[in-house]
Image (cartoon, rainbow, N blue to C red):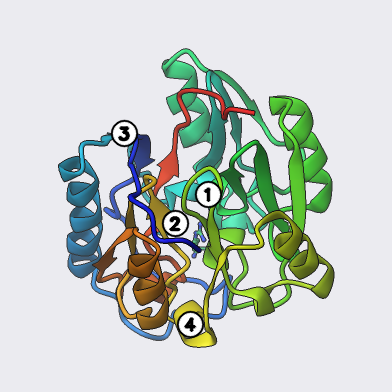
Amino acid sequence: METIARRHTTRHYLMCPPTHFDVTYSINPWMNPGKPTDQSIAMDQWQRIHDQLVDLGHTVDLVPPLPGLPDMVFAANGATVYGDKALVARFVYAERDAESPGYLDWFAARGLSVQQAELSNEGEGDFLAAGPWILAGNGFRTDRRSHVETEEYFGRPVIGLTLVNDKFYHLDTALSALDEHNIMYFPEAFTRGSQAILRQLFPDAIIATHEDAEAFGLNAVSDGKHVLMPEGAANLTAQLRKAGFEPIGMDVSELLRAGGGVKCCILELHDEAPAG
Ligand code: ARG
């Protein structure tokens, strides 16, 4: 990828404080309910992510955390939102089911047209805007048939990508969109066919190493210039700098006990439907 002066645009995000954060069940390989968690550390890590976004000039709204839902901090999974339309998640695991009404109510109260997905669909955890496309993960959580549902609902082309490594169970753990044209990803998290699609669409992408992916470095949020990401992904950080981006490393050690990082905590509300 070329080194050029990157420009950011101000964004609108939705987050959910980890008031009820805990690991009481295991639905991904990072979660071990036998190990104690520290809610105050999680809150501190989350607050730093929130404040960093605000300092960069972005608008951050909050959805109220609901008791008994320890994973609700991972707001990226709540919905996919473009313009005035929200498609709210249908979670695969019963443990997270009750989060959906919280998002349905929040978007409805703001006058968006809201629908809950018919089939398993974990929101922006698996649906990421990249230029004119929506890149969509499947394999562990979102049902491939829900890609069609999303395409119909928004009238945007969806590119399906299949995940194969259960440590990288959502698309946003294996791939991150940096701006309209650029992405970074970990090829081995995808089937060969999906790797070929990614090479065709994004020949200049930044390629993550296994260490980057293990450090959750792809669970990142970019505003076109600043890239908030879990700290520790050394190779990715260096490549981003070289390409003119400004990586900002965040400590997410406690959130990672639930299998979540920076991006998982942030749902982007694309106030303008993506250009295309
Ligand atoms: N414990 C949560 C789960 O497994 C973590 C969700 C992470 N979110 C994300 N967007 N990758 O559902």
Residue 267 in view, yes or no: yes
Q: Which numbered disc covers residue 10? A: 3
Q: Are marks 3 and 1 in contact (CB under 8 Å)?
A: no
The residue shown at (64%, 59%) is: 93
Q: Earlier in the sequence, mark 3 or mark 1?
A: 3
Q: Which numbered disc covers residue 264? A: 2
Assess disc 3: are there few (<14), some (14-19) or many (≥20) residues with their C-alpha within 10 Å of its C-alpha: few
Left or right, residue 228 beside residue 182: left
What residue did someone put label 4 on?
A: 214
Q: Earlier in the sequence, mark 1 or mark 4?
A: 1
Q: Earlier in the sequence, mark 1 or mark 2?
A: 1
What residue did someone put label 1 on?
A: 77
- 243 relative to 130, above or below: below
The residue shown at (44%, 56%) is: 264
Foreground pick, 26 / 206: 206
Is ligand 1 less than 8 Å from the beta carbon at label 2? yes
- 121 relative to 41, above or below: above
Numbered disc 1: secondary structure: helix
Q: Earlier in the sequence, mark 2 or mark 3?
A: 3
Q: Are marks 1 and 4 in contact (CB under 8 Å)?
A: no
Numbered disc 3: secondary structure: loop
Q: Earlier in the sequence, mark 2 or mark 4?
A: 4
Marks 3 and 1, Cα distance to the nearest angstrom?
Answer: 22 Å
**Label 4 is placed on what type of residue?**
Glu
| Quarter containing the C terminus | top right
Marks 1 and 4, Cα distance to the nearest angstrom?
Answer: 20 Å
Marks 1 and 2, Cα distance to the nearest angstrom?
Answer: 7 Å
